[in-house]
Image: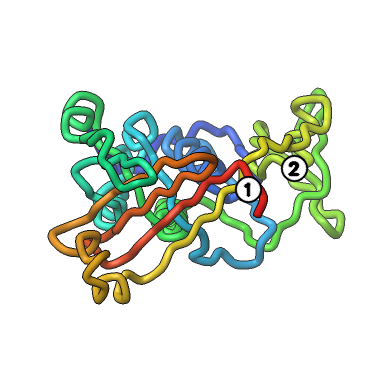
Amino acid sequence: MVQSSQPPSKSGIRVLVVGAGFAGLTAAIECHRKGHSVTLLEKFPELKILGDIISFGPNSSRIFQRWPGVAEQLDALSQRADGLEIKNWLGETILKQTWTADQEAFGIRFDGHRGEFHEVVYKHALEIGVDVRLGARVEDYFENDDEAGVILEGGERITANVVLAAEGVRSQGRKIVLGYDDKPKPSGYAVYRCWFDAGEIAKDPDLQFFTNNGDKHVAWLGPDVHFIAASVKNGKDFSWVCVSNRLY
């Protein structure tokens, strides 16, 4: 993948991005790479390292490889098991799905802590010169024949040639683009997720296989409840996800 640190030629196009999640940051970085002048607005006053596991497959990881230094940083934070071992609720192995062939055919994938990945991408946006404004809450959008933009809390108006709404499923921007309020619909499933230091697991003889000799990735499938566990960063961190279609 070709990387370039050369500053792009200026296009004269002003882009306004609302929301500094992965979608907003990626849009802002790619627009900057095309030479556009980019302002990124985020309602939270500071960005913290929060969350748990997130996965980027080859279709999205190839984008990170365009940005100098980013893929290398994500790779160092990623889960690097050789595959996923799938068991039934009795502990019997059903299937071992390996990643090596997929990575050779399609490209690398990044699996790791959402907050740590987000920090890497956020810092890259700042380093290349994206204008990021934290604590900027968008109250409304506007558009006419001459300009488009947003109105911030407090009344400030910001205009641009292009406005990208990337502030989430419950956002005003999503409602305007779709033309209706697209409320989340319950699936009947509940997902419980957690991320923590693997130090205590390394002390347990029954669980040490997760932290010894590299990362491990194991799933247990059961009636109404499924559980996925993974060690990350060569067994240093631990992530688990429990999915249930029953309320307990």
For marks 1 and 2, the one nearer the N-term is 1
Residue 202 is at least partly visible in this image:
yes
Return the residue at label 2: 171
Quick check: 26 left or right of 185?
left
In front of the other: 192 or 178: 192
Q: Position of residue 183 (x, y in %)?
A: 78, 36
* Three-letter residue code for mark 1: Gly
Cα distance in 3D space between marks 1 and 2: 10 Å
Query: Residue drawn at (23%, 36%), measured in percent from left and top?
Result: 96
Query: At numbered mark 2, what does the secondary structure look like: helix, strand or loop?
Result: loop
- Circles 1 and 2: CB atoms closer than 8 Å: yes
Q: Position of residue 213 (x, y in %)?
A: 13, 60
Query: Residue drawn at (49%, 51%), measured in percent from left and top?
Result: 242
In front of the other: 89 or 61: 89
Considering only vertical position in the picture, is 127 above or below 71? Answer: below
Return the residue at label 1: 19
